Image (spheres, helix red, strand yellow):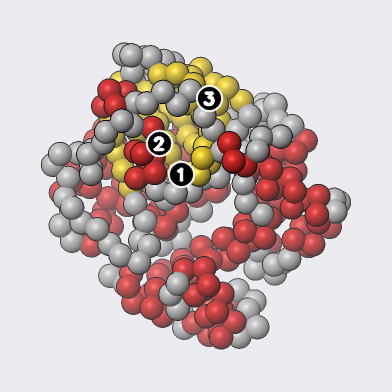
Amino acid sequence: MIKKSNIKLLSNQQDFKDFYLKEAPASFCEECGNIAYEHGSGFLEIARLEDLKKQQKNTKGQQTRRRFYSMILLAEGEIIETIGHQKFNFKPQTMYFVSESQLHAIECWSDDVKGIYCMFDADYFLLCIKHQIKLNQFPFFQIDKKPYIQLSKREMEMIEHLFWKLNSEKCMKTTFNDDLLTRMFLNVILLEAERIYNRQTIQENYSLSRKDLIVSEFQLLVTQHFIEKKQVNDYANMLFVHPNYLNDLVKEVTGHTASHFIQKQLLQEAKSRLLQTSDTVSMIASELNFTDDSYLNRFFKKQTGLTPLMFRKNHKH
Protein backbone atom coordinates (compact mmCIF):
# COMPACT_ATOMS: atom_id res chain seq x y z
CA MET A 1 0.00 0.00 0.00
CA ILE A 2 1.27 3.48 -0.93
CA LYS A 3 2.08 5.67 2.03
CA LYS A 4 0.00 8.81 2.24
CA SER A 5 3.13 10.94 2.52
CA ASN A 6 4.15 9.87 -0.99
CA ILE A 7 0.94 11.20 -2.54
CA LYS A 8 0.75 14.92 -3.25
CA LEU A 9 -2.65 16.56 -2.68
CA LEU A 10 -3.59 19.17 -5.31
CA SER A 11 -6.50 21.36 -4.21
CA ASN A 12 -6.77 23.89 -7.03
CA GLN A 13 -5.23 25.26 -10.24
CA GLN A 14 -2.40 26.98 -8.36
CA ASP A 15 -1.36 23.70 -6.75
CA PHE A 16 -1.42 22.14 -10.22
CA LYS A 17 0.86 24.88 -11.59
CA ASP A 18 3.26 24.71 -8.64
CA PHE A 19 3.57 20.94 -8.84
CA TYR A 20 3.82 20.37 -12.59
CA LEU A 21 5.20 23.59 -14.09
CA LYS A 22 8.47 25.50 -13.82
CA GLU A 23 6.77 28.84 -14.43
CA ALA A 24 3.16 29.64 -15.15
CA PRO A 25 1.16 32.83 -15.79
CA ALA A 26 -1.75 33.82 -13.59
CA SER A 27 -3.99 32.71 -16.46
CA PHE A 28 -3.11 30.44 -19.38
CA CYS A 29 -5.11 32.75 -21.66
CA GLU A 30 -3.53 36.16 -22.32
CA GLU A 31 -6.87 37.69 -23.31
CA CYS A 32 -8.75 36.26 -20.34
CA GLY A 33 -10.80 38.52 -18.09
CA ASN A 34 -9.77 38.68 -14.46
CA ILE A 35 -13.13 38.02 -12.85
CA ALA A 36 -12.75 36.32 -9.49
CA TYR A 37 -15.65 35.33 -7.28
CA GLU A 38 -15.36 34.92 -3.54
CA HIS A 39 -16.89 32.41 -1.17
CA GLY A 40 -15.94 29.20 -2.92
CA SER A 41 -17.67 29.59 -6.27
CA GLY A 42 -15.07 27.29 -7.82
CA PHE A 43 -12.61 27.57 -10.67
CA LEU A 44 -12.17 26.70 -14.33
CA GLU A 45 -8.79 26.68 -16.07
CA ILE A 46 -8.07 25.88 -19.71
CA ALA A 47 -4.62 25.52 -21.28
CA ARG A 48 -3.01 24.19 -24.45
CA LEU A 49 -1.06 20.99 -23.96
CA GLU A 50 1.84 22.40 -25.96
CA ASP A 51 2.09 25.38 -23.58
CA LEU A 52 2.06 23.08 -20.54
CA LYS A 53 4.73 20.86 -22.13
CA LYS A 54 7.11 23.84 -22.49
CA GLN A 55 6.95 24.49 -18.74
CA GLN A 56 6.60 20.89 -17.57
CA LYS A 57 8.73 19.70 -14.65
CA ASN A 58 9.93 16.12 -14.42
CA THR A 59 7.32 14.59 -12.14
CA LYS A 60 7.42 11.11 -13.67
CA GLY A 61 5.63 8.59 -11.49
CA GLN A 62 4.92 11.05 -8.66
CA GLN A 63 1.40 10.30 -7.54
CA THR A 64 -1.22 12.92 -6.74
CA ARG A 65 -4.83 13.19 -5.70
CA ARG A 66 -6.84 16.15 -6.92
CA ARG A 67 -9.72 17.99 -5.34
CA PHE A 68 -10.90 18.87 -8.81
CA TYR A 69 -11.74 17.23 -12.14
CA SER A 70 -9.69 17.19 -15.35
CA MET A 71 -10.48 16.42 -18.98
CA ILE A 72 -7.80 16.32 -21.63
CA LEU A 73 -8.25 16.38 -25.40
CA LEU A 74 -5.20 14.96 -27.18
CA ALA A 75 -4.92 16.09 -30.82
CA GLU A 76 -1.29 15.18 -31.54
CA GLY A 77 1.54 13.32 -29.84
CA GLU A 78 1.44 10.64 -27.17
CA ILE A 79 0.70 10.71 -23.44
CA ILE A 80 1.34 7.98 -20.86
CA GLU A 81 -0.36 8.44 -17.50
CA THR A 82 -1.44 6.29 -14.57
CA ILE A 83 -5.07 6.81 -13.54
CA GLY A 84 -6.16 4.85 -10.51
CA HIS A 85 -3.99 1.73 -10.58
CA GLN A 86 -3.77 1.39 -14.36
CA LYS A 87 -1.32 2.83 -16.86
CA PHE A 88 -2.72 4.21 -20.11
CA ASN A 89 -1.00 5.06 -23.38
CA PHE A 90 -3.09 7.74 -25.07
CA LYS A 91 -2.81 8.42 -28.81
CA PRO A 92 -4.19 11.29 -30.95
CA GLN A 93 -7.97 11.75 -31.15
CA THR A 94 -8.40 10.67 -27.53
CA MET A 95 -10.22 12.45 -24.73
CA TYR A 96 -9.44 11.24 -21.22
CA PHE A 97 -10.59 12.17 -17.73
CA VAL A 98 -9.20 12.31 -14.19
CA SER A 99 -11.77 12.35 -11.43
CA GLU A 100 -11.60 14.08 -8.07
CA SER A 101 -9.75 12.05 -5.39
CA GLN A 102 -8.41 9.55 -7.96
CA LEU A 103 -4.78 8.47 -7.82
CA HIS A 104 -2.96 9.95 -10.79
CA ALA A 105 0.59 10.21 -12.14
CA ILE A 106 2.07 11.63 -15.33
CA GLU A 107 4.59 9.18 -16.78
CA CYS A 108 5.48 10.81 -20.11
CA TRP A 109 4.27 13.47 -22.53
CA SER A 110 5.93 13.38 -25.97
CA ASP A 111 7.56 16.60 -27.19
CA ASP A 112 5.00 17.02 -29.97
CA VAL A 113 1.83 16.96 -27.85
CA LYS A 114 -0.97 19.27 -28.91
CA GLY A 115 -4.45 19.58 -27.50
CA ILE A 116 -6.42 21.04 -24.61
CA TYR A 117 -6.21 20.65 -20.84
CA CYS A 118 -9.27 21.67 -18.83
CA MET A 119 -9.67 21.49 -15.05
CA PHE A 120 -12.53 22.57 -12.83
CA ASP A 121 -13.90 21.83 -9.39
CA ALA A 122 -17.30 20.61 -8.23
CA ASP A 123 -18.48 24.04 -7.07
CA TYR A 124 -17.87 25.56 -10.50
CA PHE A 125 -19.87 22.81 -12.18
CA LEU A 126 -22.60 23.04 -9.54
CA LEU A 127 -23.62 26.47 -10.82
CA CYS A 128 -23.99 25.37 -14.46
CA ILE A 129 -27.69 24.71 -14.82
CA LYS A 130 -30.72 23.61 -12.82
CA HIS A 131 -31.47 19.90 -12.38
CA GLN A 132 -28.28 18.90 -14.15
CA ILE A 133 -26.63 15.52 -14.01
CA LYS A 134 -24.30 15.07 -11.02
CA LEU A 135 -20.58 14.95 -11.81
CA ASN A 136 -20.13 11.49 -10.33
CA GLN A 137 -22.84 10.15 -12.64
CA PHE A 138 -20.72 10.70 -15.73
CA PRO A 139 -19.31 7.24 -16.49
CA PHE A 140 -15.77 8.44 -17.21
CA PHE A 141 -15.55 9.89 -13.69
CA GLN A 142 -16.45 6.55 -12.05
CA ILE A 143 -13.58 4.37 -10.86
CA ASP A 144 -15.08 1.17 -12.28
CA LYS A 145 -15.38 2.59 -15.82
CA LYS A 146 -12.67 3.30 -18.38
CA PRO A 147 -11.55 6.97 -18.19
CA TYR A 148 -11.29 7.77 -21.90
CA ILE A 149 -13.02 7.86 -25.28
CA GLN A 150 -11.66 7.53 -28.80
CA LEU A 151 -12.95 10.21 -31.18
CA SER A 152 -13.69 10.12 -34.87
CA LYS A 153 -12.44 13.03 -36.99
CA ARG A 154 -15.88 14.64 -36.90
CA GLU A 155 -16.21 14.15 -33.14
CA MET A 156 -12.72 15.56 -32.62
CA GLU A 157 -13.60 18.69 -34.58
CA MET A 158 -16.84 19.12 -32.64
CA ILE A 159 -15.17 18.77 -29.21
CA GLU A 160 -12.34 21.11 -30.26
CA HIS A 161 -14.92 23.69 -31.32
CA LEU A 162 -16.78 23.35 -28.01
CA PHE A 163 -13.55 23.85 -26.08
CA TRP A 164 -12.78 26.90 -28.24
CA LYS A 165 -16.23 28.27 -27.46
CA LEU A 166 -15.80 27.50 -23.74
CA ASN A 167 -12.49 29.33 -23.63
CA SER A 168 -13.83 32.21 -25.72
CA GLU A 169 -16.76 32.74 -23.35
CA LYS A 170 -14.41 32.46 -20.37
CA CYS A 171 -12.18 35.18 -21.86
CA MET A 172 -15.01 37.55 -22.72
CA LYS A 173 -16.88 37.35 -19.43
CA THR A 174 -17.39 40.63 -17.62
CA THR A 175 -20.39 39.82 -15.45
CA PHE A 176 -21.68 36.92 -13.37
CA ASN A 177 -24.26 36.09 -16.06
CA ASP A 178 -21.46 35.83 -18.63
CA ASP A 179 -19.83 33.31 -16.32
CA LEU A 180 -23.06 31.29 -16.24
CA LEU A 181 -22.80 30.93 -20.02
CA THR A 182 -19.24 29.66 -19.62
CA ARG A 183 -20.43 27.08 -17.12
CA MET A 184 -23.16 25.95 -19.51
CA PHE A 185 -20.60 25.29 -22.25
CA LEU A 186 -18.65 23.18 -19.76
CA ASN A 187 -21.83 21.21 -19.15
CA VAL A 188 -22.36 20.74 -22.91
CA ILE A 189 -18.84 19.33 -23.38
CA LEU A 190 -19.37 16.79 -20.61
CA LEU A 191 -22.77 15.78 -21.99
CA GLU A 192 -21.38 15.36 -25.52
CA ALA A 193 -18.48 13.30 -24.16
CA GLU A 194 -20.95 11.13 -22.25
CA ARG A 195 -23.03 10.62 -25.41
CA ILE A 196 -19.96 9.46 -27.33
CA TYR A 197 -18.86 7.30 -24.39
CA ASN A 198 -22.21 5.53 -24.17
CA ARG A 199 -22.46 5.06 -27.93
CA GLN A 200 -19.08 3.38 -28.29
CA THR A 201 -18.77 1.57 -24.97
CA ILE A 202 -20.08 -1.97 -24.95
CA GLN A 203 -20.48 -3.72 -21.63
CA GLU A 204 -16.93 -4.84 -21.08
CA ASN A 205 -14.92 -6.17 -18.22
CA TYR A 206 -12.82 -3.33 -16.86
CA SER A 207 -10.10 -4.94 -14.78
CA LEU A 208 -10.40 -3.79 -11.19
CA SER A 209 -9.27 -5.16 -7.87
CA ARG A 210 -11.87 -6.29 -5.34
CA LYS A 211 -11.01 -3.23 -3.25
CA ASP A 212 -11.76 -0.87 -6.14
CA LEU A 213 -15.01 -2.69 -6.89
CA ILE A 214 -16.22 -2.37 -3.29
CA VAL A 215 -15.33 1.32 -3.16
CA SER A 216 -17.04 1.93 -6.50
CA GLU A 217 -20.17 0.17 -5.27
CA PHE A 218 -20.04 2.20 -2.04
CA GLN A 219 -19.86 5.48 -3.99
CA LEU A 220 -22.81 4.42 -6.14
CA LEU A 221 -24.87 3.47 -3.09
CA VAL A 222 -24.11 6.82 -1.47
CA THR A 223 -25.47 8.68 -4.50
CA GLN A 224 -28.64 6.59 -4.30
CA HIS A 225 -29.29 6.57 -0.53
CA PHE A 226 -27.48 9.53 1.09
CA ILE A 227 -30.74 11.27 2.07
CA GLU A 228 -32.05 8.42 4.20
CA LYS A 229 -28.74 6.73 5.10
CA LYS A 230 -26.10 8.96 6.67
CA GLN A 231 -23.98 6.43 8.60
CA VAL A 232 -21.08 4.33 7.32
CA ASN A 233 -22.65 1.35 9.10
CA ASP A 234 -25.65 1.53 6.76
CA TYR A 235 -23.48 1.11 3.68
CA ALA A 236 -21.26 -1.54 5.26
CA ASN A 237 -24.39 -3.62 5.94
CA MET A 238 -25.53 -3.22 2.33
CA LEU A 239 -22.10 -4.36 1.13
CA PHE A 240 -21.83 -7.18 3.69
CA VAL A 241 -18.53 -5.92 5.10
CA HIS A 242 -17.43 -4.57 8.49
CA PRO A 243 -17.66 -0.74 8.80
CA ASN A 244 -13.98 -0.45 9.77
CA TYR A 245 -12.98 -2.53 6.75
CA LEU A 246 -15.10 -0.37 4.45
CA ASN A 247 -13.63 2.81 5.88
CA ASP A 248 -10.08 1.47 5.46
CA LEU A 249 -10.76 0.50 1.84
CA VAL A 250 -12.28 3.86 0.95
CA LYS A 251 -9.38 5.66 2.61
CA GLU A 252 -6.82 3.55 0.75
CA VAL A 253 -8.42 3.95 -2.67
CA THR A 254 -9.58 7.60 -2.49
CA GLY A 255 -7.57 9.24 0.28
CA HIS A 256 -10.79 10.14 2.10
CA THR A 257 -12.88 8.47 4.79
CA ALA A 258 -16.19 6.83 3.93
CA SER A 259 -18.07 9.45 5.96
CA HIS A 260 -16.43 12.19 3.84
CA PHE A 261 -18.30 10.95 0.76
CA ILE A 262 -21.63 10.84 2.57
CA GLN A 263 -21.13 14.38 3.90
CA LYS A 264 -19.90 15.62 0.53
CA GLN A 265 -23.01 14.25 -1.20
CA LEU A 266 -25.25 15.91 1.39
CA LEU A 267 -23.39 19.20 1.06
CA GLN A 268 -23.59 19.21 -2.75
CA GLU A 269 -27.30 18.44 -2.61
CA ALA A 270 -27.89 21.22 -0.07
CA LYS A 271 -25.91 23.66 -2.24
CA SER A 272 -27.90 22.64 -5.32
CA ARG A 273 -31.22 23.22 -3.58
CA LEU A 274 -30.11 26.55 -2.15
CA LEU A 275 -29.03 27.81 -5.57
CA GLN A 276 -31.53 26.13 -7.86
CA THR A 277 -34.76 26.38 -5.83
CA SER A 278 -36.52 28.96 -3.70
CA ASP A 279 -37.07 26.45 -0.87
CA THR A 280 -36.51 27.75 2.65
CA VAL A 281 -33.71 26.37 4.79
CA SER A 282 -36.33 24.59 6.90
CA MET A 283 -37.81 22.95 3.80
CA ILE A 284 -34.38 21.84 2.60
CA ALA A 285 -33.51 20.48 6.04
CA SER A 286 -36.72 18.45 6.04
CA GLU A 287 -36.19 17.18 2.48
CA LEU A 288 -32.66 16.04 3.36
CA ASN A 289 -33.82 14.36 6.58
CA PHE A 290 -31.98 16.64 8.98
CA THR A 291 -33.53 16.78 12.46
CA ASP A 292 -34.21 20.50 12.03
CA ASP A 293 -32.87 23.57 10.24
CA SER A 294 -30.44 24.37 13.06
CA TYR A 295 -28.74 21.00 12.49
CA LEU A 296 -28.46 21.77 8.76
CA ASN A 297 -27.06 25.20 9.62
CA ARG A 298 -24.36 23.71 11.85
CA PHE A 299 -23.48 21.02 9.30
CA PHE A 300 -23.32 23.53 6.42
CA LYS A 301 -21.25 26.09 8.32
CA LYS A 302 -18.80 23.43 9.49
CA GLN A 303 -18.25 22.33 5.87
CA THR A 304 -18.16 25.74 4.16
CA GLY A 305 -17.64 28.41 6.80
CA LEU A 306 -20.98 29.94 5.76
CA THR A 307 -24.58 29.52 6.84
CA PRO A 308 -26.96 28.28 4.11
CA LEU A 309 -28.53 31.73 3.78
CA MET A 310 -25.12 33.42 3.46
CA PHE A 311 -24.16 30.90 0.77
CA ARG A 312 -27.40 31.55 -1.15
CA LYS A 313 -26.98 35.33 -0.89
CA ASN A 314 -23.37 35.23 -2.12
CA HIS A 315 -24.24 33.12 -5.18
CA LYS A 316 -27.67 34.44 -6.07
CA HIS A 317 -27.85 35.83 -9.60
- Of 277 and 38, the residue lying toward us: 38
* C-alpha gap between disc 1 and disc 3: 15 Å
Quadrant location of the C terminus in the rendered image: bottom left
Q: Residue at x 43, y 39 (%)?
A: 70
* Disc 1 residue type (three-letter): Leu
- Of 13 and 283, the residue lying toward us: 13
* Disc 2 residue type (three-letter): Phe
Tell me where residue 229 sits by quadrant.
Answer: bottom right
Density class for disc 3 (Cα within 10 Å; few <14, some 14-19, many ≥20) is few
Q: Which label sits on residue 10?
A: 1
- Of 219 and 49, the residue lying toward us: 49
Q: Marks 2 and 3: CB-CB under 8 Å?
A: no
Dot 3 corresponds to which residue?
A: 61
Q: Position of residue 7 (x, y in %)?
A: 56, 38
Q: Marks 1 and 2: CB-CB under 8 Å?
A: yes
Q: Position of residue 191 (x, y in %)?
A: 43, 42
Comes first in the chain, label 2 or label 3? 2
Q: Position of residue 21 (x, y in %)?
A: 33, 32
- Secondary element type, mark 2: helix
Comes first in the chain, label 1 or label 2? 1
Quadrant location of the N terminus in the rendered image: top right
Dot 2 corresponds to which residue?
A: 19
- Secondary element type, mark 1: strand
Q: Is residue 220 left or right of residue 106?
A: right
Q: Residue at x 38, y 62 (%)?
A: 40
Residue 243 higher or lower than 82, as above or below? below
Q: Which label sits on residue 285?
A: none
Residue 152 higher or lower than 71, as above or below? above
* C-alpha gap between disc 2 and disc 3: 13 Å
* C-alpha gap between disc 1 and disc 2: 8 Å
* Disc 3 residue type (three-letter): Gly
- Secondary element type, mark 3: loop
